[in-house]
């Protein structure tokens, strides 16, 4: 009897460390096999060899080692599939033999950090399993049927290949020696012979005078650093930044960052930490700005304007990668017009503009979002909240 099961997950979300992947749709179920969508466990009720194939679309993983997933069974099976990247498609397959039933099996996150499902695909995860067909014993051979009539003679086949050459016959008798020919011209000089072995080392000579001190060499480059910048650390979040917080209207909010002494850092993505998705639809965009004066900043890189967000680390690619230079002041900023949404933030800043670019700022009546080359007025410091934003490669 055939046994098979096909599962799929359509909803977004995340998977905690050592937690099971939960599928929310059963696409096909045939035979004595069941699935619990509360625990993520598959129960096998018949012995045999079961073939598993799975795929998970990952948006981002906090683990430095990438993404790790494994099929774990109640009889001790641990079939792991890993990927060194932190986003993309992670796949795996396994063949598991079952003799004593029932046996439960689940797809588990084996990393020490959680990961987010991709927001770019309709199916976030899928898994199929089927049991190999079990053939019955071979039946007895039936009686031989009557001999059929002799068929017509077939056409003559093509001529076969030529056979191998026969063995060489015996050598004939040697003829008489002919007269000696004239002496030929002297041939070219032959190649030089190999070098002979090295003779014994002579005695060490006396030490010569010490030379003068040479000029100082150029300074070495700075040590490698992590290729990212943040407005504040993720663990320092202590407040919420609501949609149009503080009675704002169509507002964008930014926080200062410092790239340090590194000559160049290439940035390709920006992330926000979404604590409340709200209505989940609206306009949402992030940008990188360079401080121009104490009151203005220039937009140097942007993401596309999107119309939906998901909870947790929400990452978008820059439309064009940007290389920022060391010892300059930059801002990471977000334009969030998704009703009832809230981002992670840090209470910080001053209530007045001092003799330096501000710690954070907000811009109101900012319809249309950011564009590269745009000059933004950063003198409104009344909100005193820094959104958690991070830019990285």
Image (spheres, rainbow, N blue to C red):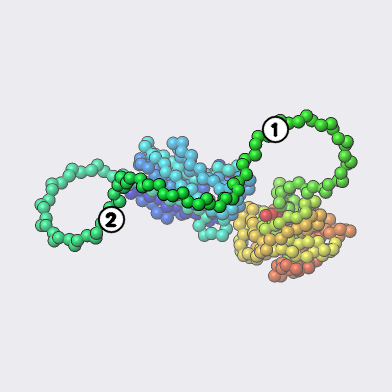
Please tell me whether mark 1 sits on a helix, a strand or a loop.
Answer: loop
Q: What residue is rendered at 19% in x and 62% in y?
A: 155
Image x and y of residue 320, in percent: 67, 63
Closer to the camera in the image, 320 or 152 = 152
- Examine the rendered structure and indicate whether residue 254 appears above or below residue 104: below
**Quadrant (top left, top right, bottom left, bottom right) of the C terminus:** bottom right
Left or right: where 267 falls relative to 57: right
In the rendered structure, the answer to whether residue 101 lies left or right of residue 348 reads left
Location of residue 376 in the rendering, given as x and y in whole percent from the top left corner:
78, 66
Q: Out of 385 and 107, give the one closest to the viewer.
A: 107
Q: Which mark is residue 130?
A: none
Q: x and y percent of residue 43 in the render?
A: 41, 43
Residue sitting at x 87%, y 39%? 211
Of residue 110 and residue 264, the one placed in the foreground of this image is 264
The secondary structure type at the circle numbered 2 is loop
Identify the residue at image location x=49%, y=45%: 107
**Mark closer to the chain start, 1 or 2:** 2
Tell me residue 148's x, y (percent). Answer: 11, 55
> In this image, 125 relative to 313: left or right?
left
Tell me the CA gap for discs 1 and 2. 65 Å
Q: Which residue lies under the disc numbered 1? A: 199
Question: Residue at position x 62%, y 54% from top?
Answer: 311
Residue 162 numbered tag: 2
Question: Which mark lies nearer to you, 1 or 2?
Answer: 1
């Amino acid at each position: 009897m055939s046994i098979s099961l096909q599962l799929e997950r359509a909803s977004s979300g995340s998977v905690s460390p050592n937690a099971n992947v939960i599928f929310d749709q059963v696409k096909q179920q045939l035979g004595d096999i069941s699935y619990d969508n509360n625990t993520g466990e598959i129960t096998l009720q018949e012995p045999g060899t079961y073939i598993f194939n799975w795929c998970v679309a990952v948006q981002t993983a906090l683990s430095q080692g990438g993404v790790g997933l494994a099929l774990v069974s109640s009889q001790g099976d641990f079939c792991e599939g890993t990927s060194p990247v932190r986003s993309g498609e992670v796949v795996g397959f396994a063949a598991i033999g079952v003799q004593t039933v029932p046996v439960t099996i689940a797809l588990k996150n084996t990393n020490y950090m959680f990961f987010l499902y991709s927001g770019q695909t309709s199916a976030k995860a899928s898994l199929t399993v089927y049991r190999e067909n079990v053939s019955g014993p071979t039946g007895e051979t039936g009686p031989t049927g009557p001999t059929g009539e002799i068929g017509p003679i077939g056409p003559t086949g093509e001529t076969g290949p030529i056979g191998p050459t026969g063995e060489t016959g015996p050598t004939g008798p040697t003829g008489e020696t002919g007269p000696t020919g004239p002496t030929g011209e002297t041939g070219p000089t032959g190649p030089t012979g190999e070098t002979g072995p090295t003779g014994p080392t002579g005695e060490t000579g006396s030490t010569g005078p010490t030379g003068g001190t040479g000029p100082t060499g150029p300074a070495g480059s700075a040590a490698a650093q992590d290729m990212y910048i943040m407005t504040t650390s993720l663990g320092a979040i202590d407040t919420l930044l609501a949609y149009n917080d503080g009675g704002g209207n169509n507002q964008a909010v930014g926080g200062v960052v410092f790239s340090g002494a590194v000559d160049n850092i290439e940035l390709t993505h920006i992330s926000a930490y979404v604590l409340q998705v709200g209505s989940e639809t609206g306009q949402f965009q992030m940008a990188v700005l360079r401080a121009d004066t104490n009151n203005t900043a220039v937009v140097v890189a942007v993401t596309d304007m999107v119309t939906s967000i998901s909870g947790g680390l929400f990452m978008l690619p820059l439309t064009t990668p940007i290389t920022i230079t060391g010892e300059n002041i930059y801002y990471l900023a977000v334009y969030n017009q998704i009703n009832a949404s809230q981002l992670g933030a840090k209470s910080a800043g001053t209530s007045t503009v001092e003799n330096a670019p501000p710690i954070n700022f907000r811009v109101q009546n900012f319809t249309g979002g950011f564009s590269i080359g745009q000059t933004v007025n950063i003198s409104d410091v009344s909100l005193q909240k820094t959104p958690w934003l991070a830019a990285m490669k």
